[in-house]
Image (cartoon, helix red, strand yellow):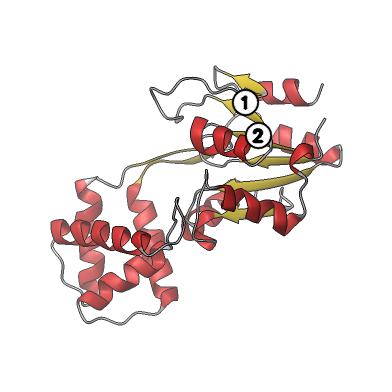
Amino acid sequence: MFKNYVFDLYGTLLDIRTDENLPELWEKFAQFYKFHGADFTPEELKAAFETECKTLSKDSPYKYPEIQLEYVFQNLFKKKGVELSIGECVTAGQFFRILSTVQYVSLYPGVKDLLCALRKKGKKLYVLSNAQKIFTWNEMVATGIEKSFDGIIFSSDYGCAKPDPEFYGILNKKYGLIPEETIMIGNDPETDIEGGKRAGLHTLYIHSNISPQGKPVPEADFIIPDGDFTKIKELILK
Protein backbone atom coordinates (compact mmCIF):
# COMPACT_ATOMS: atom_id res chain seq x y z
CA MET A 1 0.00 0.00 0.00
CA PHE A 2 2.85 2.38 0.93
CA LYS A 3 6.57 2.24 0.19
CA ASN A 4 7.78 3.78 3.45
CA TYR A 5 6.61 3.10 7.00
CA VAL A 6 7.68 5.55 9.71
CA PHE A 7 7.16 4.51 13.31
CA ASP A 8 7.08 6.45 16.52
CA LEU A 9 8.81 4.45 19.24
CA TYR A 10 7.51 4.78 22.82
CA GLY A 11 3.83 3.99 23.09
CA THR A 12 3.84 2.65 19.54
CA LEU A 13 6.51 -0.06 19.31
CA LEU A 14 7.88 -0.01 22.86
CA ASP A 15 6.05 0.02 26.17
CA ILE A 16 7.89 1.68 29.05
CA ARG A 17 7.09 3.54 32.28
CA THR A 18 9.44 6.21 33.57
CA ASP A 19 9.09 8.74 36.36
CA GLU A 20 11.73 11.44 36.72
CA ASN A 21 10.08 12.83 39.86
CA LEU A 22 10.80 9.80 42.04
CA PRO A 23 12.44 10.97 45.29
CA GLU A 24 14.62 7.86 45.42
CA LEU A 25 15.91 8.63 41.91
CA TRP A 26 17.28 11.98 43.02
CA GLU A 27 18.64 10.56 46.25
CA LYS A 28 20.66 7.93 44.40
CA PHE A 29 21.64 10.27 41.58
CA ALA A 30 22.92 12.80 44.11
CA GLN A 31 25.05 10.01 45.60
CA PHE A 32 26.39 9.28 42.11
CA TYR A 33 27.39 12.92 41.71
CA LYS A 34 28.97 12.97 45.15
CA PHE A 35 31.03 9.88 44.29
CA HIS A 36 32.53 11.98 41.49
CA GLY A 37 33.22 14.98 43.69
CA ALA A 38 30.08 17.01 42.94
CA ASP A 39 28.16 17.53 46.17
CA PHE A 40 24.43 18.21 45.69
CA THR A 41 21.48 17.49 47.90
CA PRO A 42 18.78 15.54 46.03
CA GLU A 43 16.59 18.65 45.96
CA GLU A 44 19.42 20.86 44.68
CA LEU A 45 20.31 18.40 41.95
CA LYS A 46 16.74 18.07 40.72
CA ALA A 47 16.27 21.85 40.64
CA ALA A 48 19.60 22.38 38.88
CA PHE A 49 18.74 19.69 36.33
CA GLU A 50 15.38 21.29 35.51
CA THR A 51 16.93 24.76 35.24
CA GLU A 52 19.73 23.54 32.97
CA CYS A 53 17.25 21.79 30.67
CA LYS A 54 15.21 24.99 30.34
CA THR A 55 18.33 27.07 29.72
CA LEU A 56 19.58 24.86 26.90
CA SER A 57 16.11 24.68 25.35
CA LYS A 58 15.84 28.47 25.25
CA ASP A 59 18.94 28.66 23.08
CA SER A 60 17.32 26.54 20.36
CA PRO A 61 16.14 28.12 17.10
CA TYR A 62 13.33 25.56 16.82
CA LYS A 63 9.72 25.87 17.97
CA TYR A 64 9.89 22.34 19.39
CA PRO A 65 13.46 22.10 20.69
CA GLU A 66 15.28 19.01 21.88
CA ILE A 67 18.49 18.96 23.88
CA GLN A 68 21.15 16.34 24.52
CA LEU A 69 20.95 15.36 28.16
CA GLU A 70 24.56 14.22 28.36
CA TYR A 71 25.53 17.91 28.13
CA VAL A 72 23.07 18.74 30.90
CA PHE A 73 24.74 16.19 33.15
CA GLN A 74 28.17 17.48 32.19
CA ASN A 75 27.20 21.07 32.99
CA LEU A 76 25.89 20.01 36.40
CA PHE A 77 29.28 18.53 37.21
CA LYS A 78 30.94 21.75 36.05
CA LYS A 79 28.79 23.75 38.47
CA LYS A 80 30.65 21.96 41.26
CA GLY A 81 34.05 22.36 39.62
CA VAL A 82 34.22 18.77 38.36
CA GLU A 83 35.32 18.07 34.79
CA LEU A 84 34.06 14.82 33.28
CA SER A 85 34.31 13.74 29.65
CA ILE A 86 31.15 13.58 27.57
CA GLY A 87 31.56 9.81 27.48
CA GLU A 88 31.45 9.69 31.26
CA CYS A 89 28.35 11.87 31.19
CA VAL A 90 26.67 9.49 28.75
CA THR A 91 27.20 6.82 31.39
CA ALA A 92 25.70 9.17 33.98
CA GLY A 93 22.69 9.59 31.73
CA GLN A 94 22.23 5.86 31.32
CA PHE A 95 22.34 5.44 35.10
CA PHE A 96 19.71 8.20 35.34
CA ARG A 97 17.51 6.29 32.90
CA ILE A 98 17.80 3.09 34.93
CA LEU A 99 16.83 4.96 38.09
CA SER A 100 13.82 6.59 36.43
CA THR A 101 12.45 3.43 34.85
CA VAL A 102 9.46 2.11 36.76
CA GLN A 103 8.65 -0.66 34.29
CA TYR A 104 11.40 -1.75 31.95
CA VAL A 105 10.95 -1.45 28.22
CA SER A 106 9.26 -4.22 26.26
CA LEU A 107 7.76 -4.68 22.81
CA TYR A 108 4.03 -4.54 22.31
CA PRO A 109 2.58 -7.85 21.09
CA GLY A 110 2.75 -8.14 17.32
CA VAL A 111 5.58 -5.67 16.73
CA LYS A 112 8.19 -8.10 15.45
CA ASP A 113 5.61 -9.92 13.34
CA LEU A 114 4.58 -6.70 11.60
CA LEU A 115 8.15 -5.51 11.04
CA CYS A 116 9.11 -8.86 9.54
CA ALA A 117 6.02 -8.91 7.30
CA LEU A 118 6.80 -5.43 5.98
CA ARG A 119 10.44 -6.32 5.34
CA LYS A 120 9.40 -9.43 3.40
CA LYS A 121 7.27 -7.23 1.14
CA GLY A 122 10.27 -5.00 0.42
CA LYS A 123 8.99 -2.02 2.37
CA LYS A 124 11.32 0.60 3.87
CA LEU A 125 11.05 1.04 7.64
CA TYR A 126 12.07 4.04 9.72
CA VAL A 127 11.90 5.32 13.28
CA LEU A 128 11.23 9.00 14.00
CA SER A 129 11.30 9.43 17.75
CA ASN A 130 11.30 12.24 20.27
CA ALA A 131 13.98 10.56 22.31
CA GLN A 132 17.41 10.75 23.85
CA LYS A 133 19.81 8.56 21.91
CA ILE A 134 21.81 7.77 25.07
CA PHE A 135 18.66 6.09 26.46
CA THR A 136 16.84 4.84 23.43
CA TRP A 137 19.48 3.11 21.34
CA ASN A 138 20.25 0.67 24.16
CA GLU A 139 16.54 0.05 24.71
CA MET A 140 16.10 -0.80 21.03
CA VAL A 141 19.06 -3.16 21.25
CA ALA A 142 17.66 -4.76 24.42
CA THR A 143 14.37 -5.49 22.63
CA GLY A 144 16.09 -6.73 19.48
CA ILE A 145 14.61 -4.31 16.92
CA GLU A 146 17.56 -2.03 16.20
CA LYS A 147 18.40 -3.86 12.95
CA SER A 148 14.84 -3.84 11.64
CA PHE A 149 14.99 -0.32 10.22
CA ASP A 150 16.46 1.37 7.19
CA GLY A 151 16.88 4.57 9.18
CA ILE A 152 16.53 5.76 12.77
CA ILE A 153 16.24 9.42 13.73
CA PHE A 154 16.29 10.58 17.36
CA SER A 155 15.32 14.14 18.19
CA SER A 156 18.34 14.55 20.49
CA ASP A 157 20.66 14.22 17.48
CA TYR A 158 19.03 17.07 15.57
CA GLY A 159 17.95 19.61 18.18
CA CYS A 160 14.28 19.55 17.23
CA ALA A 161 11.36 17.24 17.78
CA LYS A 162 7.93 16.24 16.49
CA PRO A 163 5.57 17.84 15.56
CA ASP A 164 8.05 20.34 14.11
CA PRO A 165 7.77 20.15 10.29
CA GLU A 166 11.55 20.62 10.14
CA PHE A 167 12.04 17.34 12.00
CA TYR A 168 9.86 15.53 9.48
CA GLY A 169 11.77 17.36 6.75
CA ILE A 170 15.04 15.96 8.09
CA LEU A 171 13.63 12.44 7.73
CA ASN A 172 12.40 13.03 4.18
CA LYS A 173 15.60 14.70 3.03
CA LYS A 174 18.01 12.25 4.64
CA TYR A 175 16.33 9.16 3.18
CA GLY A 176 14.77 10.63 0.05
CA LEU A 177 11.21 9.86 1.09
CA ILE A 178 8.25 11.00 -0.97
CA PRO A 179 5.49 12.02 1.49
CA GLU A 180 2.67 10.59 -0.66
CA GLU A 181 4.34 7.17 -0.50
CA THR A 182 4.92 7.34 3.26
CA ILE A 183 2.80 6.63 6.34
CA MET A 184 3.46 7.80 9.91
CA ILE A 185 2.38 5.36 12.61
CA GLY A 186 2.15 6.64 16.18
CA ASN A 187 0.22 6.94 19.41
CA ASP A 188 0.29 10.71 19.94
CA PRO A 189 -2.46 12.79 18.31
CA GLU A 190 -0.33 15.92 18.07
CA THR A 191 3.26 14.88 17.53
CA ASP A 192 2.65 11.82 15.35
CA ILE A 193 -0.65 12.42 13.60
CA GLU A 194 -1.04 16.19 13.27
CA GLY A 195 2.71 16.54 12.75
CA GLY A 196 2.71 13.81 10.14
CA LYS A 197 -0.25 15.31 8.31
CA ARG A 198 1.37 18.75 8.21
CA ALA A 199 4.40 17.09 6.65
CA GLY A 200 2.19 15.57 3.95
CA LEU A 201 2.38 11.99 5.21
CA HIS A 202 -0.41 9.47 5.49
CA THR A 203 -1.14 8.59 9.12
CA LEU A 204 -2.17 5.72 11.35
CA TYR A 205 -3.15 6.46 14.95
CA ILE A 206 -3.05 3.78 17.62
CA HIS A 207 -4.38 4.72 21.05
CA SER A 208 -2.03 2.84 23.35
CA ASN A 209 -1.75 2.58 27.12
CA ILE A 210 0.64 5.55 27.23
CA SER A 211 -1.05 7.81 24.69
CA PRO A 212 -1.73 11.32 26.02
CA GLN A 213 -4.93 11.27 28.05
CA GLY A 214 -7.89 13.58 27.54
CA LYS A 215 -7.23 14.31 23.89
CA PRO A 216 -9.83 13.53 21.19
CA VAL A 217 -9.13 10.85 18.64
CA PRO A 218 -7.37 12.61 15.77
CA GLU A 219 -8.38 12.48 12.14
CA ALA A 220 -6.09 9.94 10.55
CA ASP A 221 -6.18 7.64 7.54
CA PHE A 222 -6.35 4.66 9.88
CA ILE A 223 -7.36 4.47 13.55
CA ILE A 224 -6.92 1.71 16.12
CA PRO A 225 -8.75 2.95 19.24
CA ASP A 226 -8.17 -0.08 21.45
CA GLY A 227 -4.36 -0.21 21.34
CA ASP A 228 -4.23 -3.63 19.66
CA PHE A 229 -1.01 -3.42 17.68
CA THR A 230 -1.76 -6.65 15.80
CA LYS A 231 -4.58 -4.83 13.98
CA ILE A 232 -2.04 -2.61 12.19
CA LYS A 233 -1.09 -5.58 10.04
CA GLU A 234 -4.72 -6.14 9.15
CA LEU A 235 -5.19 -2.52 8.09
CA ILE A 236 -2.07 -1.85 6.06
CA LEU A 237 -1.22 -5.28 4.65
CA LYS A 238 -4.56 -6.25 3.14
Instruction: Name the foreground residue: 44 vs 63.
Output: 63
Instruction: Name the foreground residue: 235 vs 197.
Output: 197
> Which amino acid does the dot numbered 2 rest on?
Val
Q: Residue at 30% across / 63% down in the picture?
A: 55
> Which amino acid does the dot numbered 1 rest on?
Phe
Q: Residue at 74% across / 55% down in the picture?
A: 175
> Distance from label 1 to label 2 (Cα)?
7 Å
Q: Which residue is mark 1?
A: 229
Q: Which residue is mark 2?
A: 111
Mark count: 2
User: Does residue 144 show up?
Assistant: no
Residues at circles 1 and 2 in contact by the CB criterion of under 8 Å: yes
Q: Residue 87 sits in which quadrant?
A: bottom left
Instruction: Name the foreground residue: 26 vs 66.
Output: 66
Above or below — where is 71 with respect to 173?
below
Q: Residue 229 sits in which quadrant?
A: top right
Q: Residue at 26% across / 70% down in the picture?
A: 76
* Image location (x, y in percent) of residue 68: 43, 63
* Image location (x, y in percent) of residue 74: 33, 72
Instruction: Name the foreground residue: 117 vs 73.
Output: 73
Return the disc, 1 or 2, that comes first in the chain's sequence.
Answer: 2
Task: Bin the neighbour count of mark 1 within 10 Å (Cα to Cα): few under 14, some 14-19, many 20 and up.
Answer: some
Above or below — where is 100 with respect to 205?
below
Task: Bin the neighbour count of mark 2 within 10 Å (Cα to Cα): few under 14, some 14-19, many 20 and up.
Answer: some
Relative horizontal placement of residue 11, taking residue 45 as reference (left or right) = right
Relative horizontal placement of residue 51, taking residue 17 as reference (left or right) = left
User: Does residue 215 show up?
Assistant: yes
* Image location (x, y in percent) of residue 141: 59, 53
